[in-house]
Amino acid sequence: MNLPSNTPRSRAYALLLLGLALALIYLLGVHWWFTAPFLEAREDLIEARDQEAKFRHIAQQRSLIEQRLLEVREFEASNPEFLAEENFDLAASSLIQRLQNLVDAQSAGPACTVISRTPYRGQTEEPFERVTVKVRLRCELEYLTPVLHGLETESPRLFLSDFVVSSRRQFAQRGRNQAQQGVIDISFDVYGYLRKALEKGKA
């Protein structure tokens, strides 16, 4: 008995069709109904775990940040570099009084006097509010030096800037045998910072 010559090819076609049928059955009956939802749920679970890890990290960082902020507040509260007053007007008045006290401490009389002292609100944006007093002094150099040194070195810290020497004068001779001394007429800014941070938009 002779078999048809195309039997092997027919078997190959049959196997191919069977494979395609099984693949189609898997796609329609298994993958879309079971595997695909499982993979999607797995991705959601991974994403949820990632978010949970981020939230835990943020929660851990929050306590650390709060601790750092507390340390900064404590430092600012005890920092002698800031002016102790609560507002600009009180701080400016304190600066003026400090200047006057330093001048009076020289006991120089007319040899060292405060000509003018004017509070000034600057327009420059800074993290902390600056309190500036524009000062004009007329002093002999020997009295001027300790006044400026006291402003810069005593607490709270003050800063000096914008020096202008407008003239040099001569005091009248205070005694027949006493030499005249040079007097410096000088203008400058003295300023410090309030402890409270400056609010945005406030000049």
Image (cartoon, rainbow, N blue to C red):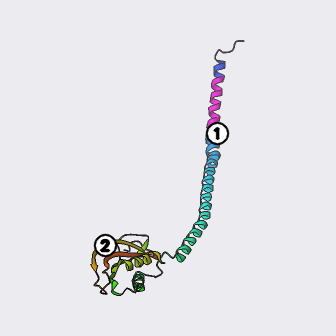
Q: Residue at x 51, y 76 (%)?
A: 80
* In the image, farthest residue toward the top: 1
Task: State whether the magenta stretch is mostly helix, strand or loop.
Answer: helix
Which image quadrant for residue 32? top right
Q: Is residue 99 left or right of residue 33?
A: left
Question: As displayed, is residue 20 above or below residue 145?
Answer: above
In the picture of the structure, the residue carrying the numbered disc 1 is 26
Label 1 environment density (alpha carbons within 10 Å; few <14, some 14–19, many ≥20): some
x, y (%) of residue 113?
34, 84
Considering the image in quadrants, where does the C terminus appear? bottom left
The reply to whether the magenta stretch includes residue 145 is: no
The secondary structure type at the circle numbered 1 is helix
Separation (CA) of disc 1 from disc 2: 92 Å
The reply to whether the magenta stretch includes residue 16 is: yes
Q: What is the count of numbered marks?
A: 2
Question: As displayed, is residue 190 above or below residue 24?
Answer: below
* In the image, farthest residue toward the right: 1
Looking at the image, tell me whether mark 1 or mark 2 is earlier in sequence order.
1
In the picture of the structure, the residue carrying the numbered disc 2 is 164
Q: Is residue 1 left or right of residue 164?
A: right
The secondary structure type at the circle numbered 2 is strand
- Magenta range is 11-23
> In the image, what residue type sits under mark 1?
Tyr
Considering the image in quadrants, where does the N terminus appear? top right
Q: Residue at x 36, y 75 (%)?
A: 189
Q: Residue at x 63, y 53 (%)?
A: 45
Q: Is residue 56 visible?
A: yes
